[in-house]
Image (cartoon, grey):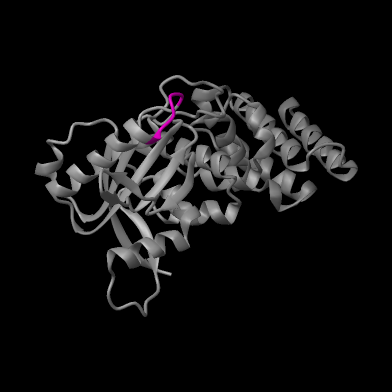
């Protein structure tokens, strides 16, 4: 029996002992065990380059390990453990809050930026496996305004080249509405968003906290009421959100820009960063948007889905 198989046997046995004793987090120790099994498999196959092509050894190991320890170590599982090490060779402290079940959902995703996005989302939103599946099913990554070169912010413990939080806004934003609703007005649309505020904030990105709806702004003898006001903890700034039931117009763009200016001048505190404006409309004329070159204003669309 070769040394790598013996090493894997010992890793599995040790993990079973830890699980029985419950001396540390079971999920954490199991994940670290599978990560180390992945490393052993790669070394047994002669290194990373050869490991990409040689699966016969995994087949042989899986037959013996399944007989000894059960179907948790079948061919597919060992293949995923190898993928785990190849995809995430660096073990981070934050792995303690993740489980093998989470990684099992993510490892089949070949696009690295897509996989990184969902793993970051799990940590940021504390997703369960079920919630992660739903989030992937909603095509959250595909709906991002910007999808390229998303880094593993939390796993790598690095702040280099992080994507702008505003680029994490989805397009379109999904809004769930009861099938029985015949006509949708801006007021009704806003109420649907408020009814599912947590989901809406996840659609917008990370760090959003709800402040209020139609908070009045007094300008001279006039009272203005932006649709929704948030505060983004990550960006340390107010975020004004305006809903438009139809196509975004030049007037709508002027309105959100005006609200942002008012908040920057009269409402935000000196230690706050500049206010951000977001519009959500049914359609966007790209020719109009091309003239909107302000970094603190973002425009996206909405899509109605059934509750």
Q: Residue at x 31, y 40 (%)?
A: 277
Relative to the observer, which residue lies in front, 177 or 195? 195
Whole-percent x, y for residue 216 in the image: 36, 50
Whole-percent x, y for residue 72 in the image: 70, 49
Left or right: 90 with respect to 3? left
Image height of 63 relative to 95, above or below: below
Whole-percent x, y for residue 223 in the image: 29, 51
Residue 206 visible from this viewpoint: yes
Q: Quadrant of the N terminus?
A: top right
So how many labels did they put on this image? 0
Image quadrant assignment for residue 283: bottom left
Q: Quadrant of the C terminus?
A: bottom left
Kindly give the residue lying farthest to the right in the view shown.
21
Left or right: 131 with respect to 177? right
Image quadrant assignment for residue 6: top right
Determine if the magenta segment contains residue 16.
no
Relative to the observer, which residue lies in front, 73 or 22? 22
| Chain part drawn in magenta | 267-271
Decide whether the magenta segment is chiefly helix, strand or loop: loop
Q: Residue at x 43, y 44 (%)?
A: 230
Q: Residue at x 48, y 32 (%)?
A: 234
Kindly give the residue lying farthest to the front in the view shown.
221
Whole-percent x, y for residue 131 in the image: 55, 54
Residue 147 visible from this viewpoint: no
Relative to the observer, which residue lies in front, 30 or 152? 152
């Amino acid at each position: 029996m070769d040394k790598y198989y013996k090493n894997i046997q010992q890793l599995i046995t040790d993990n079973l002992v830890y699980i029985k004793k419950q001396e540390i987090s079971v999920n954490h120790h199991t994940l670290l065990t599978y990560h180390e099994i992945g490393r052993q498999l790669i070394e047994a196959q002669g290194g990373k380059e050869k490991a990409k092509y040689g699966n016969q050894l995994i087949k042989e190991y899986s037959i013996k390990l399944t007989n000894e320890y059960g179907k948790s170590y079948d061919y597919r599982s060992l293949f995923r453990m190898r993928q785990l090490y190849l995809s995430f060779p660096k073990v981070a402290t934050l792995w303690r809050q993740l489980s093998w079940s989470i990684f099992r959902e993510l490892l089949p995703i070949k696009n690295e930026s897509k996989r990184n996005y969902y793993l970051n989302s799990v940590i940021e939103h504390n997703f369960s496996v079920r919630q992660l599946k739903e989030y992937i099913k909603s095509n959250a990554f595909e709906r991002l305004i910007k999808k390229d070169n998303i880094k593993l912010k939390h796993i790598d413990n690095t702040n280099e080249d992080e994507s702008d939080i505003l680029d994490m806004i989805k397009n379109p934003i999904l809004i769930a509405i009861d099938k029985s609703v015949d006509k949708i007005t801006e007021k009704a649309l806003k109420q649907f968003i408020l009814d599912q505020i947590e989901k809406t904030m996840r659609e917008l990105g990370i760090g959003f906290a709800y402040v209020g709806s139609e908070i009045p702004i007094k300008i001279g003898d006039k009272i203005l009421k932006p649709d929704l006001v948030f505060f983004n903890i990550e960006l340390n700034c107010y975020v004004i959100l305006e809903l438009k039931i139809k196509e975004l117009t030049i007037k709508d763009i002027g309105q959100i820009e005006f609200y942002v200016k008012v908040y920057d001048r009269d409402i935000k505190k000196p230690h706050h960063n500049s206010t951000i404006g977001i519009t959500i409309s049914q359609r966007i004329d790209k020719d109009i948007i091309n003239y909107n070159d302000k970094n603190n204003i973002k425009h996206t669309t909405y899509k109605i889905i059934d509750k």
